[in-house]
Image: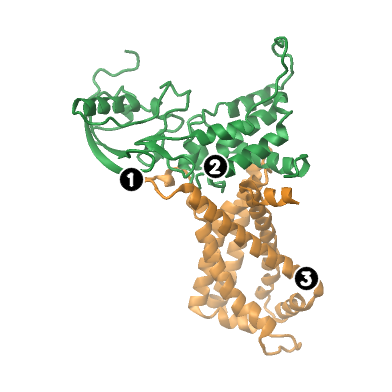
Amino acid sequence: MSWLSNALTSSIGRKIIMAVTGLFLCSFLVIHLIGNLQLFKNDGGDAFNVYSHFMGTNPVIRTIEWVLVAGFVFHIYEAIALTGKNRKARGSQGYVENRIGQNSPWASRNMGLLGTVILFFLIVHLYNFFWRARFGTLDKDINNHDDLYTLVVTSFHEWWYVLLYVLAQVALCYHLIHGFKSAFQSLGLTHRKYTPFVTYLGYAFAVIVCAGFAAMPLYFFFLQ
Amino acid sequence: MAGSNPNAKPLNLTLKVWRQQNRNAQGNIVDYQVRDISPDMSFLEMLDVLNEDLLRKGEEPVAFDHDCREGICGSCNLFINGRAHGPEPGTTTCQLHMRKFSDGDTITIEPWRAEAFPVNKDLSVDRSAFDRIIQAGGYVSVNTGGIPDANEIPIPKSIADQAFDAATCIGCGACVAACKNASAMLFVSAKVSQLALLPQGQVERKTRVENMVAQMDKEGFGACTNIGSCAAECPVGISLENIAILNREFLAAKATSNNLG
């Protein structure tokens, strides 16, 4: 199997792993957003708690959860490996003057920075909601489900928490604007027939998904 | 002279030039003044003026790479004011004219920077890594014997055009110099897609992409992160689409070639 490990550790192989895991994580974002839209249902959190109970207990979901963990781990690991390789390739002596801003977009050059912001957010986010829902003791709601909804509402009344969420969604948006179309490029999925559509779809995906997520804390902070 | 402007004012410029004695020496930026530069001169002719001044003063001239001085050979390679081949799109350093600058300008001139492109001296860099990548697979097999008829192998016009566009790469290395990751993928992809598109390139199609990518990694070039600086700075307009072709050629070759290594 040395051919496979050689292929996957080559510079193109690593990019292919980044692309595959990145698009997989995009699919997770869609599911996560659609599920969480139930926060907007004005039912005191019944639907959201039923949904979170299902997500926390269903064996299929619990299995796929590990695939999701693997997706994050590989995406982050490859990002670190590629960054190290690319820094080494750039060399120790940099340019005295480099106007790279004139030939490339900011987000494309700062995927590592944006990713680090998203990772920081992810850790806070997992600790506050996922960790407490899975391993902590939440109060029960009227249906005897863990009342995650109340925790969400309480959290989203903290100004600094709302600010962190909104900033993280801005970072995610820029990360996706580059990442979505870049994944198709890395996989070699380009053609003059559909590449313009992929580029457009990437922008729309980034803006819609991130605006959707950012709307949740803003909704509870300002309107509830 | 055609195209020249007899009324154009000569330029006086300050140059900040990277000077480095040899590959192992520590280099630094040295300031020079050049006077009465005609706006009709090319950038390299301006450097010739500087070097003549230096020789007259008994100083060592600035080493820089150049050969054809008409944008074909890919020898000239200067990082001018923070841009590969200077700020003009679609031009090599030798095609950059001094009329693009203004009197009193300060111009920073540096060599290509990349771990795989060590500086030989001053502004001259060793780009033999590119030669070794080409040797690893940038060729086609041909039959010996009689001369084949022209146009013996039918090739659709659109494919021939696409292959030709890729073939226009002059191997100057601006893509590597401009890339945040010092990646050589635009260069490698130009050769891989040129030969993958054509019937003549089919014999080595899979081994070519495998070997050229392996050599590229061995030389210490970075990995592409689809930033696009390379194509923006490429003097002959090699498109990023070639990198996508390289990626799928690589994927297909790894999945189906007989090379188990």
Single out the residue that lies furthest toward the left: B57
Quadrant including the C terminus of chain B: top right
Residue B32, quarter of the rendered image: top left
Judging depth in this view, the residue of B186 and A151 nearest the camera is: B186
Mark 2 lies on residue: B219
For residue A176, say whether it is visible: yes
Labels 1 & 3 near each other (Cβ < 8 A) = no
In the rendered image of this protein, which colour is used for chain B? green
Mark 1 lies on residue: B26
- Three-letter amino acid code of the residue under disc 2: Glu
At x 54% / y 57%, what residue is drawn?
A174
Callout 1: chain? B
Quadrant including the N terminus of chain B: top left
Spot the orange chain and give its letter: A
Badge 3 crowding class, 10 Å Cα cut-off, few under 14, some 14 to 19, many 20 or more, is few
Q: In the image, which disc is placed on residue A63?
A: 3
At x 63% / y 45%, what residue is drawn?
A185
- Three-letter amino acid code of the residue under disc 3: Thr
Image depth: mark 3 or mark 2 in front:
2
Badge 1 crowding class, 10 Å Cα cut-off, few under 14, some 14 to 19, many 20 or more, is few
- Three-letter amino acid code of the residue under disc 1: Gln
